[in-house]
């Protein structure tokens, strides 16, 4: 693996969250980072002490506040001819850089706003509106509901909060009472998966990036239906045909070339929806900035001498380097999913790990609703298909909930195969739109033996009394968690849900004891899947 490409001049990436700046390795010459103090920041600071400055003011400073901090100014002025790079440019950031005679690398804030905002974006696209679904621009009081759902967007939005699905006249009227004179964009509702890509405009080329599935609106990760909470780079391989991928790249090229003509350089993202009924791809929006998934994507790219990571292509483009013969390194697997600050999950407790997670985790100190709280990165897909979490996605959900409840992560679990008349007793779960079954049991506590844990949990969860066969328990390793399953010998009582499960039973997180015929075990969504083969031995 080669060394990361370095900026041509001393470059200071100033970021509210340090993760945004880590698409380029801090060991790259002439590359420096200024950010807020955070768990990840402190970890990176230990390794790159002279390249990273962390500001600790007891609260999270926005980018413009970091730039105006006296300690940051001294750090920047320690280098001759400093250049500034930010996640998203603003007119305030431009004025601060101008005042301090720093060169700001980002394209102009005015151009970014014109391209990115929902209404001016339509006007800016001109002939390229051919890529959009059926749409119109109106004042909100002039919008009517004709019994067909549609998407309503205000000009400015953040992480889905300015996008509303209108499914009833009442919902529309509620908004009209509050914002009657506000201009809005009305777009035909397209049912299907959302896709996105991080692309780069250079002075002499447009480099289409990798297509990822955009994970949106899944509880408990967010309260916002249209909020993006992650990306999956593996799933598009199943969703898109070669012809659809070619059309997607043509769309990127057309938009990128228009941006190029107007002076844009560097990263931009496009969000696209795949209409499931027709297989057509429609442009939903353009993100005129560094997309949030850039750092994760760059980390998945196996660097070779002749290719560029997404972040490297961004840096080179901003310095007006030629990228005529360049390409962005392909990514065909890997994913990330984010727990945002929600009404129910406002913070995480002090993380307690029985075993370290076998995936990457970043903890944030954000408190604003819908801002990043926990970011999890996997080498495999967290999505099984559109709107359905994979086994890794289920792990991400369990991890997020465990951290918010203050539960130890990956403590050993013990349970019991309760088999009677060719059937096995399972605990059926419905957890935030996810349906699956588990073997009755629970987490080992304190100095319990695994046998004691299994017997206690069975009594609590099922109200049954069992004895165990005098054979070694089945041991499986599920996502780096040790699980032990005993086999019931004698069984007395009638199964009845009890314990914490009965008390916690509610619509979005329900528990139900069910008997499943051993012949049907292969058709059951049972976690972990590996226990199925062991169950068959005893039925």
Image: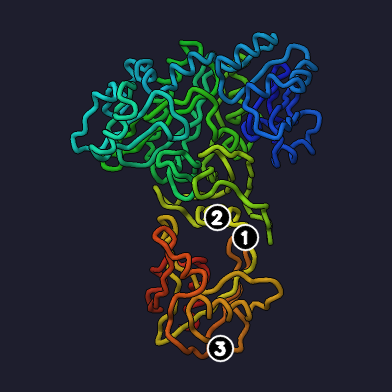
Give the residue pinned by disc 3. 467
Q: Residue at x 58, y 38 (%)?
A: 296
Q: Secondary structure at mark 2?
A: helix
Q: Quadrant of the N terminus?
A: top right
Q: Earlier in the sequence, mark 3 or mark 2?
A: 2
Among the 4 quarters of the image, the one containing residue 182: top left
Q: Residues within 10 Å of mark 2 (few under 14, many from 20)?
A: some
Q: Secondary structure at mark 1?
A: loop
Q: Residue at x 63, y 24 (%)?
A: 63
Give the farthest residue toward the front: 177
Q: Residue at x 62, y 64 (%)?
A: 481
Give the residue pinned by disc 1. 407
Q: Earlier in the sequence, mark 3 or mark 1?
A: 1
Q: Which mark is residue 487?
A: none
Give left or right: position of 171 versus 259.
left
Q: Is residue 388 above or below residue 316?
A: below
């Amino acid at each position: 693996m080669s060394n990361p490409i370095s900026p041509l001049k001393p470059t200071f990436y100033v970021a509210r969250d340090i993760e945004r700046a880590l698409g380029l390795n801090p060991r790259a010459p002439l590359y420096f980072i200024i950010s807020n103090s955070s768990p990840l920041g402190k970890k990176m600071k230990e390794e790159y002490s002279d390249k990273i400055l962390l500001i600790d003011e007891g609260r999270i400073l926005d980018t413009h506040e970091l730039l105006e901090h006296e300690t940051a100014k001294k750090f920047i002025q320690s280098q001759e001819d400093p250049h500034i790079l930010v996640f998203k440019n603003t007119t305030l950031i431009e004025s601060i850089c101008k005042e301090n005679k720093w060169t700001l690398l980002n394209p102009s804030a005015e151009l970014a706003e014109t391209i990115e905002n929902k209404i001016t974006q339509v006007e800016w696209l001109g002939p390229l509106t051919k890529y959009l679904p059926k749409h119109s621009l109106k004042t909100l009081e002039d919008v009517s509901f004709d019994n067909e759902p549609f998407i309503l967007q205000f000009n400015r939005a953040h992480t889905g909060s300015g996008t509303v699905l209108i499914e009833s006249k009442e919902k529309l009227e509620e908004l009209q009472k509050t914002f009657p004179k506000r201009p809005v964009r009305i777009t035909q509702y397209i049912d299907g998966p959302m896709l996105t890509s991080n692309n780069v405009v250079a002075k002499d080329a447009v480099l289409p990036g990798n297509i990822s599935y955009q994970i949106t609106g899944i509880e408990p990760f967010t309260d916002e239906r249209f909020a993006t909470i992650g990306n999956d780079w593996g799933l598009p391989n199943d969703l898109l045909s070669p012809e659809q991928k070619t059309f997607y790249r043509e769309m990127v090229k057309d938009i990128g070339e228009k941006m190029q003509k107007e002076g844009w350089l560097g990263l931009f993202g496009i969000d696209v929806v795949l209409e499931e009924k027709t297989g057509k791809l429609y442009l939903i929006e353009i993100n005129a900035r560094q997309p949030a998934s850039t750092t994760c994507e760059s980390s998945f790219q196996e660097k070779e001498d002749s290719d560029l990571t997404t972040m490297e292509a961004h840096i080179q483009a901003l310095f007006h380097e030629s990228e005529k013969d360049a390409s962005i390194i392909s990514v065909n697997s890997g994913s990330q999913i984010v727990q945002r600050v929600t009404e129910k999950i406002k913070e995480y407790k002090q993380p307690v790990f029985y075993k370290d997670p076998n995936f990457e985790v970043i903890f944030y100190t954000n408190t604003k609703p819908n801002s990043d709280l926990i970011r999890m990165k996997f080498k495999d897909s967290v999505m099984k298909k559109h709107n359905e979490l994979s086994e890794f996605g289920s792990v991400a959900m369990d991890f997020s909930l465990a951290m918010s409840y203050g539960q130890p992560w990956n403590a050993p679990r013990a349970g019991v195969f309760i088999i009677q008349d060719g059937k096995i007793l399972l605990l059926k779960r419905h957890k935030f739109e996810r349906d699956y079954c588990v073997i009755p049991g629970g987490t080992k506590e304190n100095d319990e033996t695994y046998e004691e844990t299994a017997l206690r949990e069975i009594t609590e969860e099922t109200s049954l009394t069992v004895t165990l066969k005098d054979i070694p328990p089945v041991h499986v390793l599920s996502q780096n968690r040790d699980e032990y399953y005993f086999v019931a010998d004698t069984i007395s009582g009638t199964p009845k849900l009890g314990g914490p499960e009965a008390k916690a039973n509610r619509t979005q997180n329900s528990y139900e004891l069910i008997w499943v015929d051993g012949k049907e075990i292969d058709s059951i969504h049972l976690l972990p899947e590996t226990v199925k083969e062991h169950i068959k031995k005893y039925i």
